[in-house]
Image: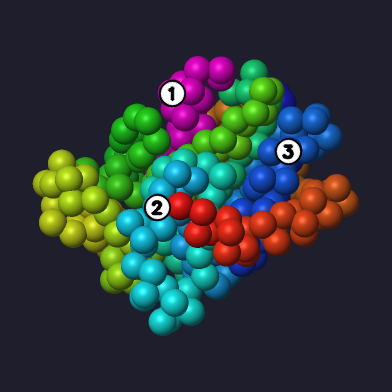
Amino acid sequence: MEKWRLIIDEGDVYWNMAVDEAMLILREKNIIPNTLRLYVFKPSSVTIGRFQKLREAVNLEYLLENKISFTRRITGGGSVYHDEGGEITYSIVASIDSISRDIIESYRRICMGIIYAIKSFGLNPVFKPINDIVVNNKKISGSAQSRKKNALLQHGTLMYNTNLDILEKTLKAPKEKLVSHGVSRIRDRVTTLSIELGYIVSKREVVDALITGFSKALNIEFYRDHYSEEEEKLASKLVKKYSSREWIYSR
């Protein structure tokens, strides 16, 4: 059985996005191995998709007034509120050939790790292509991808106890998207493990479930490790990009 590196980490929004990009760059050069990274945004923060217009994706005034940090990802998709005490973010950086060159199939294969994790809590999650997972018709996980010639980065969320009141205040969603889901506000479209189960799920439970889930989905074993010197150096340089006004306000 193939072995992948596992890193468990936490950091601010700029560090987390810098590390993900650094890992993608170095995996493309075959400097680092296939890796699963499980991490927390500390403090709670917001990321927006590469191609989103900032003011259409978030409630900018609320973020600034409440000193909630935010940045732009290199991946597509929509805006995300990352709750320090209620969400685990995963990132997989791997050779494309070890996952799939077909984009939808690669999303499906990786998202099966989250499906298995959620099923371990006794729930019935459904994968909604291209990148959402829903429970009882409400979104509980979303993912996004960036690819180079030979390597891919896919990262995404699993909300286990996210504060949906704050989520709703930080994010914006197009009215047509809400209408298409039969809801009038964001919080009616999303859910968490704790809401679905009726008790507070712990971070430790979710991390363990994700490790087991990805192992099953990708038929791999994990070994705990840490960042290489090259990753640390490159990520530290990229932090400047992710904290720059030029990058964040580029659209």
The boundaries of the magenta stretch are 100-119
Q: Name the residue that disc number 2 marks.
A: 53
- State which tag comes first along the sequence, 1 or 3: 3
Q: Amino acid at mark 2?
A: Lys
**Taking 128 as reference, is 50 above or below it?**
below
**Label 2 packing within 10 angstroms: few (<14), some (14-19), many (20+):** some
Q: Amino acid at mark 1?
A: Ile
**Label 3 packing within 10 angstroms: few (<14), some (14-19), many (20+):** many
> Which one is in front, 36 or 54?
54
Q: Secondary structure at mark 2?
A: loop
Tell me the distance, in whole angstroms, between the alpha carbons under discs 2 and 3.
25 Å
Q: Residue at x 24, y 60 (%)?
A: 187
Q: Residue 42: image x %, image y %?
A: 58, 70
Q: Name the residue that disc number 3 marks.
A: 25
Q: Nearer the viewer, mark 2 or mark 1?
A: 2
Residue furthest right as drawn: 229
